[in-house]
Amino acid sequence: MTRTADLFGPVAEDIPAVADRLRGLSNGHHSLLSEALAYVFDSPGKQIRPALVLLSGRLGRFQRDRLVTLAASIEAVHTATLVHDDAIDEALSRRGLAALHRVWDRKVAILVGDYLFAQSAQLASELDNVPIMGLLSETVMAMSSGELRQYAAAFHGTPDEEEYLQRIAGKTASLFAMCCRGGAIVSEQSPERAEALRAYGLNLGMAFQIADDVLDIVGDDKTLGKPAGSDLRQGTVTLPVILYAQQAADHRRLLDRMEDAQDVQTIVRAVRASDAPTRALERARQFASSARGALEAFPPSEAREALVDLTDHVVTRGY
């Protein structure tokens, strides 16, 4: 399986600087805050969002330090949402470690998440760029709206595909779009190119989330690091389940009992046995294709090729 880091091409050596910047955020605070921040940044994840910032910046006037600052700001937002999500969902682990709220408690987790949102704004302000601050605000609002959509729909039957797409556009794809558009702004690219990169990021984020939702159904517990069907246990109905429900006569009876662990496994088995995961993955590929199309505005370069490669990777990882 291809390691994600192998796809980062010309910015592979710059990615560690983002992780270093984030780890530095844990210094100089009250011991509880310092320890909690050091804990959440101990496992940096796959770093796809920082890579998108840096690769997008490579397509313009590459200013490494400013792009690293932007990437750290965006990764702080992403980490804040994970900390909050895990506390709300009572998740057991994250990135191979016990979830923050299980090491301390939910109150600490919520406050650390709040601090990270504020820290993200502080990092972005170092760029002294009003459009970046506006973009950050818009993105956090879009992500919060997506989360609220998900919460409102939990355990309330099967949403239609359009509702699902609106949810993941806010919750996931908006941050991918900010990575790319923000990278374009910081690297002083034209409005047309910034818009093309925004479209690339949005479509890549849609493909990424749909593929992730398929993996939650078809993946094994070892690969996922959590039980298959975890989304359903939280009452979240994703695209593979929506597509299954469109053609299954007994789906309503099953979905009405999603809070029961045994029934969740019944639904997972039924969806796996259908063609719904394949159809959902095809939708992910369509978004990935749209992302590639947005890159036609750029001449060939190593950074452009790395961005193209990511469109393939997001829909094949884990399979």
Image: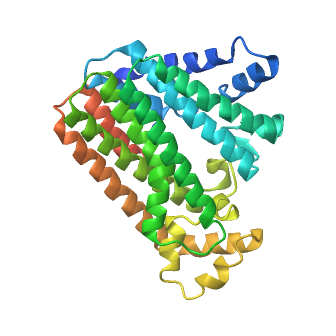
The image's colouring method is rainbow
Above or below, comparing residue 285 to residue 5 in the picture: below
Residue drawn 76% across and 71% down? Answer: 260
Extreme residue in the bottom direction: 249
Residue at 70% across, 45% down: 86
The image position of residue 36, as x and y in percent, is 75, 26
Query: Which residue is located at x 62 percent, y 49 percent?
Result: 223
Q: Tell me: 171 left or right of 252.
A: left
Look at the picture and state if 205 lies above or below 192: below
Across and down, in percent, residue 52 comes to: 39, 32
Q: Report whether 89 appears left or right of 192.
A: right
The answer to whether residue 2 is left or right of residue 195 is right
Please provide percent x and percent y for residue 131: 36, 29
> In this orientation, which residue lies closer to the viewer: 87 or 278?
87
- The residue nearer to you, when weighing 128 against 57, is 128
Q: Nearer the viewer, residue 318 or 182?
A: 182
Examine the rendering and report whether any part of residue 6 can be seen: no
Q: Farthest top residue?
A: 28
Query: Quarter-wise, where is residue 195 in the image?
Result: top left
Task: Pinpoint residue 248: horizontal percent, then vertical percent.
Answer: 53, 84
- Number of numbered discs on residues: 0
Q: Is residue 280 visible?
A: yes
The residue under the point 32% across, 33% down is 306
